[in-house]
Image (cartoon, helix red, strand yellow):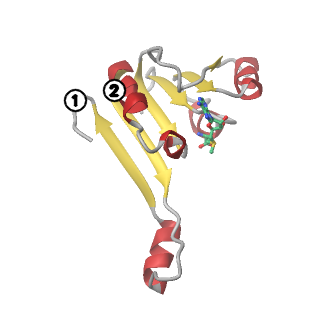
Amino acid sequence: MHQQSSVVDLCCGPATLYQRYLRHKNIQYTGLDINSRFVKRLSSWGATGIRWDLRETKPFPPADYLIMQSSLYQFLPDPRPVLNRMLVAARKQVIITEPIRASGKNRSPSTARYGRRAFLQLALMQGDDY
Ligand SMILES: C[S@@+](CC[C@H](N)C(=O)[O-])C[C@H]1O[C@@H](n2cnc3c(N)ncnc32)[C@H](O)[C@@H]1O
């Protein structure tokens, strides 16, 4: 992510992405979360935090990157309304990361090992099908 990029982090939670990685870069960060405690804290750190229920249909704030980490599962079984609004708001890229847990007794040990480590990372360029 280049300096001077703008990022909107959906379901930002405690904003780990900002705290650990982005706050020392020259990046304009906005975190959206339904939990007002998280977004208030962000504002006190000098970033932007907005209380936002993603189930509402209003358009997301535009930015270079629209990011959602470990949260897409909350919008299943049909994540398309959220994904479509991310694609509209992203000038450069939509980034979704979702951990995959290997569970279930039928998995082979090697599959389970892989699954514990694996992270599914989808980078959906604007205009791509998903
Ligand atoms: C598993 S946490 C992920 C937090 C953060 N993205 C991370 O990776 O650390 C899920 C977050 O989604 C938020 N959330 C749940 N439903 C939401 C909704 N409808 N709109 C906005 N945020 C929501 C929760 O408040 C919580 O902070």
- State how far apart marks 2 and 1 are (Cα): 7 Å
Could you tell me which secondary element the residue under label 2 belongs to? helix
66 displayed left or right of 101: left
Amino acid type assigned to the residue bearing label 2 in the image:
Leu
Amino acid type assigned to the residue bearing label 1 in the image:
Gly
The residue that disc 2 covers is 87
Residue 98, image x, y percentages: 48, 50
Q: Residue at x 48, y 85 (%)?
A: 109
- For the residue pair 2 and 57, the one nearer the viewer reads as 57
5 displayed left or right of 69: left
Q: Quadrant of residue 24?
A: top right
Residue 112, image x, y percentages: 49, 77
For ligand 1, tell me if the residue under mark 2 lies within 8 Å: no
- How many other residues sit within 10 Å of disc 2, few (<14), some (14-19) or many (≥20)? many
Which quadrant does the C terminus fall into?
top left
* Residue projecting furthest to the front: 77
- How many other residues sit within 10 Å of disc 1, few (<14), some (14-19) or many (≥20)? few
Q: Which mark is residue 26?
A: none
- For the residue pair 114 and 4, the one nearer the viewer reads as 114
Residue 46, image x, y percentages: 69, 17
Say if 109 sits above or below 66 in the image.
Answer: below
Residue 124, image x, y percentages: 31, 38
Marks 2 and 1: CB-CB under 8 Å? yes
- For the residue pair 20 and 67, the one nearer the viewer reads as 67
User: Is residue 2 in sight in this rendering?
Assistant: no
The first of marks 2 and 1 along the sequence is: 2
